[in-house]
Image (cartoon, helix red, strand yellow):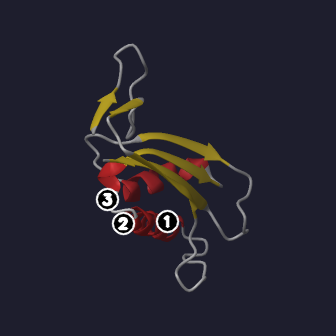
Amino acid sequence: MQKKFINPETMPPTFGYSHVVEVSNAKRTIYISGQVVINIDGQIVGINDLATQTRQVFENIKIALEASGLNFNDVVKLTFFLTDISQMAVVRDIRDQYIDTNNPPASSAVEVRKLINDNLLIEVEAIAVAN
């Protein structure tokens, strides 16, 4: 499998994401459902604390990836849903502890009025590819 991270010079500059991730010869594609800040005990983690919630979300994604024998280097797309998009810098700082910042996945961020529970501030979906 090969991944090519493409940021055409004729497109706007990127800030922590790639415009295009081209994958060839992948044998598996893994779709990870939107992860929220519910831990293994079913408890909401980090009420009113976006940094803590983001860390828990990325830990949940890490566990999901590992269940398929993968890691964050295999992620080609992240989609963020935030109740306050102005706080994206907080999310990016934590995300950067998990991803390869030299070749970041393609990403989208969407502000939403509300998630499934009033205490949730963030939800993240991931797509990964593997041999």
Determine the secondary structure under disc 2.
helix
Within-10-Å neighbours for mark 1: few <14, some 14–19, many 20+: many
Q: Earlier in the sequence, mark 2 or mark 3?
A: 2
- List the residue tagged with mark 1: 57
Residue 42 location (% of width, % of height): 60, 82
In three-dimensional space, the C-alpha distance between marks 2 and 3, rounded to whole angstroms, equals 17 Å
- Mark 1, secondary structure of its residue: helix
The residue located at (33%, 59%) in the rendering is 70
Nearer the camera: disc 2 or disc 1: 2
**Number of other residues with Cα within 10 Å of mark 3, as a class: few under 14, some 14 to 19, many 20 or more:** few
114 left or right of 9? Answer: right
- Is 109 left or right of 19, judged from the image as shown? right
Q: Mark 1 belongs to which amino acid?
A: Val
Q: Which mark is residue 97?
A: 3
What's the residue type where badge 2 is placed? Glu
Closer to the camera in the image, 89 or 97? 97
Residue under numbered circle 2: 66
